[in-house]
């Protein structure tokens, strides 16, 4: 293994598959945790965190679901384990389980250092319709207000309270009002924009929500975002704004949005760098370099497997460098941060550890041959 591989920055761990909302853009609520006894166990997760902390003292853990807060014990055990190891914790939740001030305080004191609550709009009817449950808007907004209040009360200046806002055809023109509501009414630290991709977990042959809601005018959206940048002093990264425009222009050009993930449609440019910074570990302990299934992963079974996987995944990286799948726009995997501050953080990681070495042609060829051999053995 070349000694120059920089360590991972983020590890995503899924703790459940189920959910209590019914979003039109996500299929998680149609699953369950009936096979929970086969899940990656807490001590195995903590073992991975030991390895992560040894590789990168500035690494972060992202706790994922389903709706991860439905399993509160697992959620806080994992967050606590990470905090003990000096690992920063991030998590996106739907807000339905933060109903009282005590839970908001617990989140600030024992939960993630960056808490994002998903909101599809500042307009109640848009949020509720796309989250599939009446009253979801009030619950998300109540959670946000409780968290902002708990943060203030506890003087927890290091904890960040974010809104994760999903942008699609029916809400993108309202983006100014969305920023105003999140920053000035709720008082959250940031509105993070997340752009509609084909339905999460969607395995059906057609994707009606994506077909209906992916028709965003990319140029108009870029202008709207740039205006909000000035109006609300957001410090946005112009390269990211360009990529958002490119994403929606690419979607318009494909012509078959109804196929969702079942097509080979791609964005024009390569915008993802997940293979240089992330490891995604699913419920069963399968480690991959992205959320998709199209690139090989490795099951983590023994101590040291996580480190070995990261340091030996050259073949996966070589393929991912040529991947322009739609998920490249996701905030978890895209190369460009939305803010200039986030961009600086990424550059400082490169300053500390150096760049991921570009694969030489000889190594790519060798990895290609190894992959062919693996396929033949399977
Ligand atoms: C899969 S959810 C899991 C966490 C939690 N249940 C929640 O909704 O916040 C994580 C994020 O993915 C977003 N998401 C779901 N379906 C999506 C899609 N098709 N395209 C883009 N983002 C999506 C959600 O809005 C949410 O902010
Ligand atoms: S986006 Fe989150 S809240 Fe909505 S169904 Fe998926 S997991 Fe549940």
Image: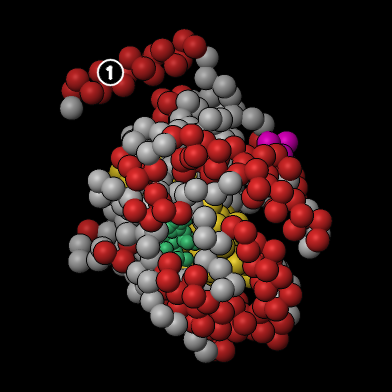
Question: Is the C terminus in the top left, top right, bottom left or bottom right quadrant?
Answer: top left
Residue under the image location 67 percent in, 39 percent down: 242
**Residue matched to label 1:** 372
Residue 373 visible to an observer of this rendering: yes
- Looking at the rendered structure, the secondary structure element under dot 1 is helix
Q: Nearer the viewer, residue 378 or 146?
A: 146
> In the image, is residue 235 above or below residue 239?
below
25 horizontally vs 156: left or right: left
Whether residue 252 sits left or right of residue 181 in the image: it is: left
221 lies left or right of 166: right
Q: Nearer the viewer, residue 126 or 67?
A: 126
Mark 1 CB lies closer than 8 A to ligand 1:
no
Using the image, determine if residue 346 lies above or below residue 125: above
Q: Residue furthest top?
A: 362
Q: Is residue 201 above or below residue 363?
A: below
Residue at the location (43% across, 42% down)?
Answer: 290
Q: Quadrant of residue 121?
A: bottom right
Answer few, some or many: residues within 10 Å of disc 1's Cα (few below 14, many 20 plus, some between 14 and 19).
few
Residue 286 % position (x, y): 33, 46
Give the residues in magenta. Answer: 347-351
Residue 13 picture location, percent across and down: 42, 56
Rendered residue at 60%/67% (across/down): 163
> Residue 3's image quarter?
top right
Residue found 63% across the figure and 63% down from its top:
174
Say if the magenta span includes residue 36: no
| Image spot of residue 211 (x, y percent) | 39, 49
């Amino acid at each position: 293994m070349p000694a120059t591989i920089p360590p991972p920055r983020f590890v995503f761990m899924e703790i459940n598959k189920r959910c209590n909302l019914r979003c039109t853009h996500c299929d998680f609520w149609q699953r369950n945790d009936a096979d929970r006894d086969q899940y990656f166990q807490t001590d195995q997760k903590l073992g991975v965190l030991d390895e992560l902390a040894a590789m990168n003292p500035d690494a972060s853990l992202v706790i994922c679901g389903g709706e991860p807060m439905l399993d509160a014990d697992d959620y806080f055990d994992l967050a606590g384990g990470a905090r003990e190891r000096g690992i920063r914790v991030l998590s996106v939740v739907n807000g339905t389980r933060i109903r009282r001030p005590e839970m908001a305080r617990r989140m600030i004191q024992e939960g993630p250092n960056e808490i994002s609550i998903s909101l599809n709009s500042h307009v109640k009817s848009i949020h509720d319709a796309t989250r599939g449950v009446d009253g979801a808007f009030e619950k998300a907004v109540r959670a946000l207000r409780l968290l902002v209040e708990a943060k203030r009360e506890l003087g927890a200046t290091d904890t960040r309270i974010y809104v994760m806002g999903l942008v699609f055809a029916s809400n993108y023109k309202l983006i100014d009002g969305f920023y105003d509501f999140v920053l000035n009414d709720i008082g959250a630290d940031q509105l993070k924009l997340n752009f509609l991709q084909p339905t999460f977990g969607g395995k059906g042959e057609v994707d009606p929500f994506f077909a209906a809601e992916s028709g965003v005018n990319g140029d108009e959206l870029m202008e709207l975002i740039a205006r909000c940048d000035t109006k609300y002093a957001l410090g946005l990264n112009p390269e990211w704004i360009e990529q958002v425009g490119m994403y929606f222009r690419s979607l318009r050009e494909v012509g078959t949005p109804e196929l969702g993930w079942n097509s080979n449609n791609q964005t024009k440019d390569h915008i993802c760098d997940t293979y240089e910074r992330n490891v995604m570990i699913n419920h069963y302990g399968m480690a991959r370099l992205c959320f998709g299934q199209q690139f090989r992963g490795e099951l983590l079974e023994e101590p040291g497997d996580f480190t070995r996987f990261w340091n030996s995944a050259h073949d996966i990286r070589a393929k991912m460098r040529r991947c322009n799948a739609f998920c490249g726009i996701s905030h978890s995997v895209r190369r460009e941060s939305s803010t200039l501050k986030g961009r600086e953080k990424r550059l400082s990681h490169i300053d500390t550890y150096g760049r991921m070495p570009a694969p030489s042609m000889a190594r790519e060829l060798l990895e290609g041959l190894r992959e062919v051999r693996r396929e033949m053995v399977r």
